Image (spheres, grey):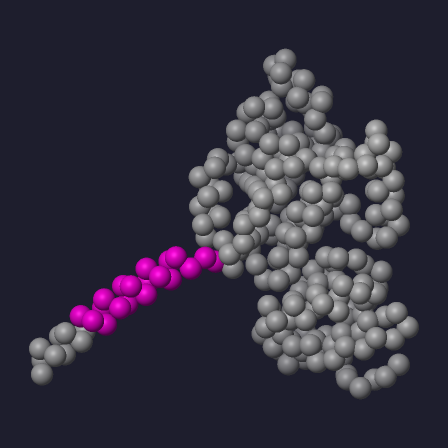
Amino acid sequence: MSEAIHADKVMDLKGLPCPMPVVKVSKGIKEVAVGQILEAQTTDPGSLTDFPAWARTSGNEIVETIQENGIIRIFIRRKV
Amino acid sequence: MTHELATLEKQVADLRAKLEGIERRVPSNKLSMVVFSGDLDRALAAFIIATGAVAMGMDVVMFFTFWATPILRDPAKKVEDKDFMGKMFGTMLPKGACSVKLSKMNMGGLGTAMMKNLMKQKNVASLDQMIALAGELGVQIYVCELSMELMGFKREEMIQYPAMDFCGVAKFLEEAMDSRIQLFI
């Protein structure tokens, strides 16, 4: 596993389909401070389009997206 | 000079009044949804959109009317004093989210059962789980008073939901006018 980015909190959302990843991350992001990184791990391919849409709307930033062995790791910086 | 100042002040006041008027007409970051259908698939879609909208930072208001009304009945609650038509509707319409059927491929209930099974296998939340989640997330539900009256439903037989009220069309329209998105499902 590449560990390029340090995550302040990791959420395991593997196996959860729509709308759960986005619903849970919108709650979880409040548990890190502004400027910190939340890593969401999902297996839902819809997350690849959903998380950027959610980030744009909520004013947060997707720092990096890594796909490995069917797991999608999305690193989100809390900005608001 | 003082005359010019007075004119300027008046212009600023006029502009401010205009701006306030415009601001009042800008809808809130809100989603208003009419849930009309009593089908499982449509109701699920409604709740997926509703919970997703909360995640996107929106306020969500759902209006349950006509065939969607019985989705919010609590199967564990019994109401005695119903008239003949009320009893008939009560028996023929689904009693709560668990007894709602698919709009297609129901096949006498077999299709719905298969779909529910598949949903469980694939970790998809059931309709009553979605309703509970919506409640947790602060989704406001309004139930159409006319539908309650027509079908003879009583408030006592509806589910426990954190934010449920009963209303008429004016309340829906007020919310819809103040919403960026309005949907009819």
Q: Quadrant of residue B153?
A: top right
Left or right of residue B115: residue B17: left
> Image point 60% across, 22% down: which residue?
B152
Q: Is residue B33 above or below residue A53?
A: above
Q: Nearer the viewer, residue A32 or B12?
A: B12
Q: Is residue B21 magenta?
A: yes
Left or right of residue B143: residue B90: right
> Image point 26% across, 68% down: which residue?
B15
> Which percent across, then down, holds residue B129?
74, 46
> What's drawn in magenta, residue-wise?
B10-28
> Which percent across, then down, holds residue B157?
65, 29
> Which percent across, then down, holds residue B36?
61, 37
Q: Nearer the viewer, residue A25 or B46?
A: B46
Q: Is residue A74 magenta?
A: no
**Residue B132 visible, this angle:** no
> Which percent across, then down, holds residue A1?
89, 81
Left or right of residue B33: residue A69: right
Q: Quadrant of residue B40?
A: top right
**Residue A50 visible, this angle:** yes
